[in-house]
Image: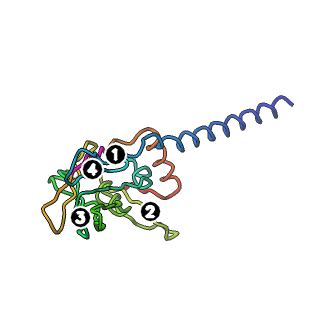
């Protein structure tokens, strides 16, 4: 009788541990309030939400990165690039998003999954035997550091900048990536 009770206790402890890990992962990314524009700046300006992103594959692809700007010419277009990104042996400016400026001079530009995978993680999207999308890691991602993001107007000389912090993957991010590998969603070659 006591052996069965011991097995039930162990099973309960395992499920409780999994539940607590799930709650931790749910709450881990919900702590930063949204940013707002500086009312003292009269010219073009830009913010990015979130201000920090992780280089963990699951974390990066699961995070919606949005650049918002104001103070541009109505009906203009902007493109956003990260300045001085080391790619192999060279340093380049990487285009990460673009947007149309509305009639009030505001824009919102979301970074696509393809850009996150190809430009930030230095990976590619492939498919597995079930014809599901898989992220294939073949080389290291961009360097973890604080980057300057620059929004450049297509029709005028207006430019706005902000900072984007790119961090090394946390222990939790590495665990998610390991789980993604086990589930066949992430391949390392």
Q: Is residue 172 visible?
A: yes
Residue at 43% in and 49% down: 59
The residue carrying pointer 4 sits among few (fewer than 14), some (14 to 19) or many (20 or more) residues within 10 Å by Cα, namely some
Instruction: Determine which residue is flagged by label 1.
Output: 51
Of circles 3 and 4, which is in front? 3
Of the residues under marks 2 and 3, which one precedes in the sequence? 3
Q: CB atoms at circles 3 and 4 under 8 Å apart?
A: no
Q: Is residue 65 left or right of residue 175?
A: left
| Disc 3 secondary structure class | strand
Where is 81 relative to 30, above or below? below
Instruction: Determine which residue is flagged by label 2.
Output: 134
Q: Does the magenta stretch mainly form a helix, a strand or a loop?
A: strand
The residue carrying pointer 3 sits among few (fewer than 14), some (14 to 19) or many (20 or more) residues within 10 Å by Cα, namely many
Instruction: Work out how far the residue at label 1 is from the one at label 4, CA to CA, in angstroms.
Output: 17 Å
Of the residues under marks 2 and 4, which one precedes in the sequence? 2
| Disc 4 secondary structure class | loop
- Residue 6 image point, x, y percent: 77, 31
Instruction: Work out how far the residue at label 2 is from the one at label 3, CA to CA, in angstroms.
Output: 31 Å
Q: CB atoms at circles 2 and 3 under 8 Å apart?
A: no
Of circles 2 and 3, which is in front? 3
Q: CB atoms at circles 1 and 4 under 8 Å apart?
A: no
Its colouring scheme is: rainbow
Instruction: Determine which residue is flagged by label 3.
Output: 78
Instruction: Find the residue positioned furthest to the top.
Output: 2
Of circles 3 and 1, which is in front? 3
Magenta-tinted stretch: 161-166
Instruction: Work out how far the residue at label 2 is from the one at label 4, CA to CA, in angstroms.
Output: 20 Å
Instruction: Determine which residue is flagged by label 4.
Output: 142
Residue 162 counted in the magenta span: yes
Picture quarter containing residue 151?
bottom left
- Residue 145 image point, x, y percent: 26, 42
Of the residues under marks 3 and 4, which one precedes in the sequence? 3
């Amino acid at each position: 009788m006591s052996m069965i009770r011991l097995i039930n206790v162990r099973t309960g402890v395992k499920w409780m541990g999994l539940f607590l890990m799930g709650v931790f992962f749910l709450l881990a990314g919900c702590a930063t309030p949204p940013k707002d524009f500086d009312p003292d700046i009269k010219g073009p300006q830009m913010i990015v939400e979130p201000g920090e992103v992780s280089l963990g594959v699951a974390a990066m692809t699961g995070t919606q990165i949005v650049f918002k700007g104001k103070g541009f010419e109505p009906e203009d277009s902007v493109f956003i690039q990260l300045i001085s990104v080391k790619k192999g042996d060279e340093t380049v400016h990487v285009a990460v998003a673009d947007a149309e400026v509305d009639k009030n001079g505001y824009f919102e530009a979301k970074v696509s999954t393809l850009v996150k995978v190809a430009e930030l993680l230095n990976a590619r999207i492939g498919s597995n035997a079930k014809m599901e999308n898989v992220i294939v890691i073949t080389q290291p991602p961009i360097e973890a550091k604080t980057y300057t993001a620059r929004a450049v107007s297509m029709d005028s000389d207006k430019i706005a900048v902000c900072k984007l912090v790119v961090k090394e993957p946390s222990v939790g991010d590495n665990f998610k990536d390991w789980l993604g590998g086990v589930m066949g969603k992430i391949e390392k070659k």
